[in-house]
Amino acid sequence: MQIKNTFVAMLLAAAALGLSACASYDHKDYPRESWFAPSTQVISADQFKKLETPLKVALVVNYTWEGRPIVQEPFEERPADWREQYGLELAAARYLEETGNFIIVDPDDKEKQGVISIDVTRQMDEKTKAALASKKANQNEYPEKIVYEYDMTMKMELSLTDGKKFEAIPKTDHMFIGHEESEERKVGVNPKRFTFSYFNNMDFQTEFVRRFYKQMIFEGVQQIENELQ
């Protein structure tokens, strides 16, 4: 009976911690939304013309974060955040297939019709770095409502086994993560609210993949779509 009571107490404590985490997220002015620069034309998967027979292609994603290439192999050279690069591969495969133009296959698949290479670089905007440094130096004076801005570039190349090549460079290169009342938010495009129960760095990574990366991949496919059909 004592063991059962102890177990129940542990569950209640865990629940209380979970609720307190959610409460702190609700009551503090952490970023809650993401949005794009005004010039961005947001693209969705249903805007693409679906190919009757999608191309079977292998996928390669090369990722550079803050000037540092993220690698998976060899294993001993993997940085601590190599999982980000792996996550981008999985996300890219899903988004490419959502367009209806591609089916992602293994590199050694005998039915492979080509290779898609995606080179992506991402870094935090210098304004955000400066704001974070100021806040760290003046914890009691600096306002908490920092708008996080990220810059990204992407180059997408489709190389078919018949020798044809297509290259695309998405136009979108900036995204904001901030607050409903932010000045940038008032002129931004397509704001979406976070769905997370608490705040941490993974929120930024998830939001980055879900919106920024997806938008750029769709832009790249859109640029070469007419040439494929």
Image (tube, rainbow, N blue to C red):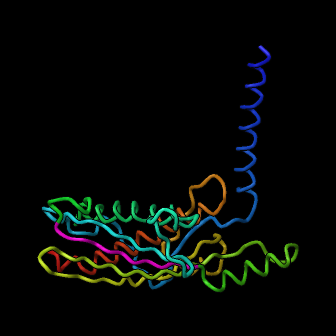
Can you say which quadrant of the picture contains the N terminus? top right
Residue under the point 75% across and 61% down? 28
Can you say which quadrant of the picture contains the C terminus? bottom left
Q: Quadrant of residue 154?
A: bottom left
Q: Quadrant of residue 72?
A: bottom left
Q: Is residue 117 highlighted in magenta? A: yes
Seen from this angle, which residue lies furthest right? Answer: 140
Residue under the point 15% across and 59% down? 110
Answer above or below: position of 130 versus 197. below
Answer above or below: position of 203 versus 219. above
Most prominent secondary structure in the magenta stretch?
strand
Image x and y of residue 170, in percent? 37, 82
Tell me how many marks there are.
0
Image x and y of residue 220, in percent? 32, 78
Seen from this angle, which residue lies furthest top? Answer: 1
Range shown magenta? 113-123
Residue under the point 53% across and 81% down? 151
User: Is 111 on the left or on the right of 107, as rendered?
Assistant: left
Nearer-the-camera pick, 85 or 177 = 85
Nearer-the-camera pick, 33 or 124 = 124
Residue under the point 77% across and 20% down? 5
Image x and y of residue 171, in percent? 40, 85
Answer above or below: position of 170 versus 96. below
Q: Is residue 67 highlighted in magenta? A: no
User: Is 51 on the left or on the right of 171, as rendered?
Assistant: left
Q: Quadrant of residue 167?
A: bottom left
Image x and y of residue 71, in percent? 47, 69
